Image (tube, helix red, strand yellow):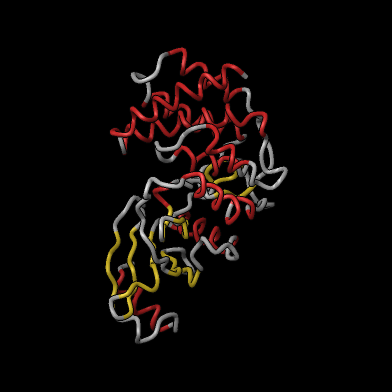
Amino acid sequence: MQIEEIFVELRQRGIIDHRIDDWIPLSGGTLSTVYALRENQQPKLIVKMNDPLTVRLESEYLKFYKSIPLFAQMIQVHENYEYFVYTYQTGEATYPRKHKKAMLHRLVTQLINHTKEDPSAEGYGYQDKPSPTWQDFLLLRYGWAQETLERVLSAEDHKFVEQLIRNTPESGRKYLLHGDCGVHNFIFEQEQVTGVIDPIPTIGEPLYDLIYAFCSSPDSLEPETIEHAVKSMDGGLYHLSTLYADVLIGLYFRMATCIVHHPQDLEEYLQAWNIWKMKVEKE
């Protein structure tokens, strides 16, 4: 559907009234087509279009976590999942690269501690293409990362990460995770995270989202930064004994993404890689 058709349909169904008088396209990292519906040139609602499976999974995620203030509120989803509508979140989409420890603490207390198990979940990892086990999901991510990092890390490093993954439990609890919980999907006001957008619904352990956030920017990657956040997690949501290995795996994945999207950050990530690898080897 075109935005003109959607606009008329929303009017006819009473989802929007005459005060919403125009729309503008939004750009960003998402693969969806996104528009802001505006009132007096101020964004009020978001219309997001993608393939039906993606629309269904994202809209169901927002419904599942409708009580979490960091997320937008679902307004409407098309019956054939051609689009969905949710509230606009004010703020800046640029991470200030400050106060990472406080940001992670807020993320834990406002989001991760409210993560719930999904009793209907099938498999692990990305909901649109679930893997049989959690280990299979990590190995899937490893395959792409290994190819991308082939000339960056040594063969010994690649084998080390693969072995860490093969030492992880094959299965576990099935929590519904954000799946792309990085600073590129955070909204900030006064240098504080106030919103989280664009989930890639994923089934796994809550620590995955925290490690993803920690590794999503190259600043403040010292162990004490994430250790402080982990201490704020509700008991039972993490396994402290495997934290360092899990972080090294997450850092490995993030460095591969960095090469594709932010190659200028690679040197900082490599410095952190050496620190974390030493910690894991000492364990």
From the viewer's perspective, tell me whether residue 219 is left or right of residue 79. Answer: left
> How many marks overall?
0
Work out which quarter of the rendered image holds the N terminus and state it.
Answer: bottom left
From the viewer's perspective, tell me whether residue 140 is left or right of residue 170. Answer: left
State the residue at coordinates (49%, 32%): 222
The image quadrant that residue 256 belongs to is top left
The residue lying toward the viewer, choosing from 73 and 229, is 229
x, y percent for residue 97 = 38, 45
The residue lying toward the viewer, choosing from 94 and 118, is 94
State the residue at coordinates (61%, 31%): 243
The residue sitting at the top extreme is 156
State the residue at coordinates (34%, 72%): 43
x, y percent for residue 258 = 35, 35
The image quadrant that residue 149 belongs to is top left
x, y percent for residue 269 = 39, 30
The residue sitting at the bottom extreme is 18
